[in-house]
Amino acid sequence: MTEKILSAGDYISAKCTKCKATTNHTIVAMVGKKVVKVECNTCGGTHNYRSEAAGKKPTKRKATTTKPATESKAQRAWEEIMAQSRPEDSVPYNMANSVTTGMLIQHPSFGLGLVINCIRPNKTEVRFQSGVKLLRCKLD
Ligand SMILES: [Zn+2]
């Protein structure tokens, strides 16, 4: 995202405390590249400028708090796989080795994984404890 260089006298959309809405404002004062004071073009009131980006952050945080639920679901799926698998039968993951669905592999960074899907010509979906990863591989 490229940031527009603003200066006093420019128009900017900001949340007006009096109008209780996002309205067009004229920049009154700036500190460096930061807008500090704006004048509302709707009500004429002058107030400190608060960037919209800062206000959007709580929404993002909310989105991340929903993640653990999905992670525990993945964890359960992983435990089910492990209950039916024999880790001693796993083969070391190697891009040059051919894999098949249902194969247990040992990845140097992700650990033990189960091949759940082979996507031609050279990709495979592998479920690791940390989640499903798309890996390059050789298919028969
Ligand atoms: Zn206003």
Image (spheres, grey):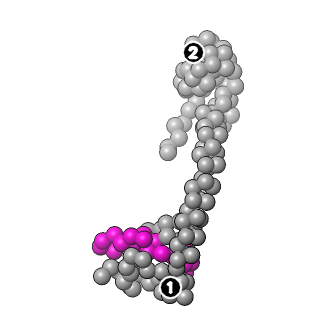
Which picture quadrant has residue 118?
Answer: bottom left
Q: Position of residue 33 (x, y in %)?
A: 62, 37
Q: Nearer the viewer, residue 42 or 6?
A: 42
> What amino acid is labelled 2 in the image?
Asn
Residue, far top:
43
Find out if the beta carbon at label 2 lies less than 8 Å from the nearest ligand 1 atom.
Answer: yes
Which picture quadrant has residue 28?
Answer: top right
> What amino acid is labelled 1 in the image?
Ser
| Quadrant (top left/top right/bottom left/bottom right) for the C terminus | bottom left
In the rendered view, would you say 107 is above or below 134?
Answer: below
Is residue 65 left or right of 89 when viewed as pictured? right
Q: Kindly identify which residue carries mark 2.
A: 41
Element class at badge 2:
loop
Residue at 61% over, 54% down: 69
Q: Nearer the viewer, residue 115 or 136?
A: 115
Q: Can the viewer see residue 1?
A: yes
Judge depth for marks 2 and 1 and give the one in front.
Answer: 1
In the rendered view, would you say 56 is above or below 92?
Answer: above
Q: Position of residue 68 (x, y in %)?
A: 63, 55
In the image, which disc is placed on residue 90? 1
